[in-house]
Image (tube, rainbow, N blue to C red):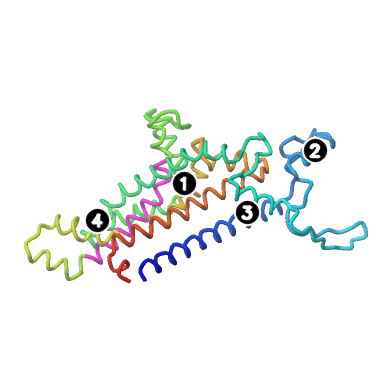
Amino acid sequence: MKLKHRLFDVARRVVILLLVVWTVVSLVTLLIELVPGDPAIAILGEQATPEQIAQFRRQHELDRPAFFFTYSADAEGIRTLRWHGWQNRYVDYWRGILHGDMGKSFRTDRGVREMIFERYPATIQLAAAALVVAVAFAVPLGVTAGRHKGKLTDNLLSVVALVGISVPSFVVGPLLIYLFAVKLGWLPAYGREYPESTILPAVTLGAALSALLTRMVRASVIEELGEDYVRTARAKGLGERSVLFKHVLKNGLIPVVTVLGLQLGVLLAGAIVTEKIFNWPGVGLLLIDDGISKRDYRLVQGCVLVISVTYIVANTLTDMVYRWLDPRIRVS
């Protein structure tokens, strides 16, 4: 019975994953098709001849209908709805995905999958570094604030956390560049050439998450300190440090782990802005500079697909860790 239940749970998760990915990519496809402008003109330039534009559109199958039907008006203003069946770019795209083919970039004629996975490690590196920065700051600050509830230390840390949440990354990034790269010259401002190049973008991306986690850790510590098992541990003679880090923190981190998994998607989305600020060669920079700005449909679709799948996988792993930390969930 247990095996049957687990298989059903796995199947349900796979179905949900597929539905979410299909919905996200379909919405992005619809939106980029509705945005005014022609990819041929965006890539070839305003000086391109009609013959060049027509050849470009044929080469990339842009002369075919985008979806199952088109809605158009003739010279007299009569609107008609024309059904195209399964012969459209949308269906062809998903057929390619099922075979592991994300198509080719309009601008470079390179495989989209190849272009994305050249940049993917840089984005994961930045997101992981930002996560480490956030946790490294949030846990000690949150524990300190929780231990000193209502005191000056707690109030000061709460103000710092509030400021961290309020200030956006496009403000934090340039400030850090000005201070540590321009004025002090300690760290590189752009690129990914050196190991220390990760520090400024990671701090920029992890600052808001660190502030949020600090408030969550504080609330969790305050709540757990009032539980009966804490009083029992103290009555047995355990030191305050042992009670705090061995018992309170383990239970208090359960909701924090959940937020960390959910916030990975926010980190990936925030990485788009951060990568642009620091010229970090990740998927976000590829999406903005080569995808959206050039109306490269296939590249935009591929980047969104990879980001959404990464987000879903991270949430699934978070759920597994959550079950491991809280045995009550495994029993239920």
Instruction: Decide whether residue 115 is among the magenta residues.
Output: no
Residue ID for mark 2:
53
The answer to which of marks 3 and 4 sits earlier in the sequence is 3
Measured from the top left, where is residue 86 in percent x and y? 74, 57
Mark 4 Cα within 10 Å, few/some/many (few <14, many 20+)?
Answer: many
| Mark 1 / mark 3, whichever is N-terminal | 3
Q: Which residue is mark 4?
A: 143
Q: Is 3 placed above or below 132 here?
A: below
Give the distance between the C-alpha atoms of the residues marked 1 and 2, in whole angstroms. Answer: 39 Å
Q: Which residues are magenta?
A: 202-224
Find residue 212 and report its horizontal and vertical position in percent: 37, 56
Label 3: element kind: helix
Could you tell me how far apart the alpha carbons at marks 4 and 2 are, in whole angstroms? 62 Å
Earlier in the chain: of badge 2 and badge 3, it is 3
Q: Secondary structure at mark 4?
A: helix
Residue wearing tag 3: 28
Q: Amino acid at mark 2?
A: Ile
